[in-house]
Amino acid sequence: MARIIQCVPNFSEGRNKDTIEKIVEEIRIIEDVKLLDYSMDKDHNRTVVTFIGEPEKVIEAAFNACKVASELIDMRSHTGEHPRMGATDVIPLIPISDVTMEECVELSKKLGKRIGEELNISVYLYEKSAESLSRENLADVRRGQYEGMADKLKEKDWVPDFGPIELNEKSGVTAVGARMPLVAFNVNLGTNDISVAKNIAKSIRGAAGGFKYCKALGIEIKERNIVQVTMNMVDYTKTPLFRVFDVIEREARRYGVNVIGSEIIGLLPMAAMIDVADYYLRLENFDHGQILEKRMME
Amino acid sequence: MARIIQCVPNFSEGRNKDTIEKIVEEIRIIEDVKLLDYSMDKDHNRTVVTFIGEPEKVIEAAFNACKVASELIDMRSHTGEHPRMGATDVIPLIPISDVTMEECVELSKKLGKRIGEELNISVYLYEKSAESLSRENLADVRRGQYEGMADKLKEKDWVPDFGPIELNEKSGVTAVGARMPLVAFNVNLGTNDISVAKNIAKSIRGAAGGFKYCKALGIEIKERNIVQVTMNMVDYTKTPLFRVFDVIEREARRYGVNVIGSEIIGLLPMAAMIDVADYYLRLENFDHGQILEKRMME
């Protein structure tokens, strides 16, 4: 099987195109890695880069990009609206195909260790890679931002996972961690009654007693005169799309409302879609290796 | 998008492993081509090879394999139970991903022309590549077998599409053509009454007034004490799996019988499964390019 992970590093530079091109070039030149997207935000003074590929090659590309960022970006003169703590602010690693979360956690530690040791940058492991509950949430890790990091690194609870306790003033601090891919999934309802969408969203979202890995809101789609349950599916392996879709359909029926369609925004792993087909066809013993394209990627 | 076609050439040699290894090696060594399977049949004295890859590279591999077969196999001494007319008996080309049937037909003509001109082997275009109705069916094209080809090639209606009218006695005749992938799809029913499976099979198969691109039979699965509708879906783009599955479920209901599961035997294109998910989720405007693995293959 083709092993694929995704990496979505955020760099604290959104204005100097030359700098970003040099960082991105480090990703472009690595074989078995595909650069999917990068978008510079001037107000945030921040660039989000998306790439996928063979796990070891993704780590290599991420390290090289982080190294160039540490050479070209100086946090001492960085301003921007988005919270940030380092030149390479955060590096999420995301399992896509034939890679477990445990493997992604190991990869994040390997990457964090290299950044700490070879680039002399303090690194916090976050999300699934966090070694304590207090470091799981990126907002907690980044609290105090770049300006507060010199002191934070010296706090007993905030000793970095890798790299120096003394702040690298030029490069700041980098968070590295493994997380699941996020699938943006919306279901459209045949009514303009926003209370129906809000009630259904409440019934399915994890925070309110619904599906643990589903975040949901009810919103209006004014140009179509309908309402929508808009969701972030934060672990499609444990809260699959089909289960949530079926429950939305049943809940809508209570209000005499039909599901008129759904949409997936952006990218998602093939497995999230194959699982849907597998469920509705009630497939017995289907192996994703039966898909010709998977064989091609072997 | 990653353009992929499949090729399943049949060679008239199923006993001499050395010969087959030399033929298969021509496929193995081509980059961007994946050898998926090859199986020698001693009784048929025939080997079926399955490979996929970038269209132009697949054609190159198929031509090279055909060339080696023409050097190593001598049809004058060939015996075996399976009907055959050439050293390379038949070369089907099958669109899998981001390739149209029309493109596959063009590729088959390009390949047939090279075999005719460079190897001096007579070639018939069959299936979707056939230029007349009488050549669509492989059984019609192969009728008379190797032994009858010297005369057949000289008949007015059987002038070859490429290559000589005089039989190449060593290599025989080769059929080249484009066809759709075949998806083997079975649906299991919660009864041991074979008449239910037979009736449902009849209601869905094209030949009896059902779905044009569905071949279906009702059979018993004795070890599970159930019956099954076993199908060959010969064009999943025009007769999709979900539509046939839904009709089977509705027909079964007439008999008070439940669909207890289904199975896909062997390989299938990703699109055949994504179409199922798309249908049941009622997706609006889903593009297969949203699947990360497709991006990886670009």
Image: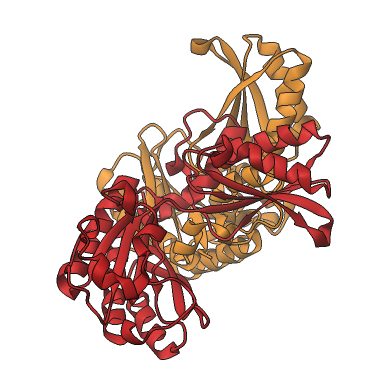
Chain colours: A red, B orange
Eyeballing the image, is B233 above or below B67?
above
Residue in view at x 83 percent, y 50 percent: A192
> What is the quadrant of residue B60 in the picture?
bottom left
Q: Nearer the viewer, residue A206 or B244?
A: A206
Eyeballing the image, is B143 above or below B227?
below
At which x and y percent is residue A141? 34, 60
Residue A47 relative to residue B159: left or right: left
Q: Nearer the viewer, residue A20 or A15?
A: A15
At which x and y percent is residue B132? 72, 56
Eyeballing the image, is B185 above or below A89?
above
Q: Is residue B178 visible?
A: yes
Q: Nearer the viewer, residue A196 or B239?
A: A196
Tally of numbered discs: 0
Residue A275 relative to residue B239: left or right: left
Residue B43 relative to residue B235: left or right: left
At which x and y percent is residue A146? 34, 74
Eyeballing the image, is B116 above or below A262?
below
At which x and y percent is residue A126? 33, 56
Q: Is residue B8 visible?
A: no
Residue in view at x 61 percent, y 15 percent: B227
Q: Nearer the viewer, residue A181 or B199?
A: A181
Residue B186 relative to residue A190: left or right: left
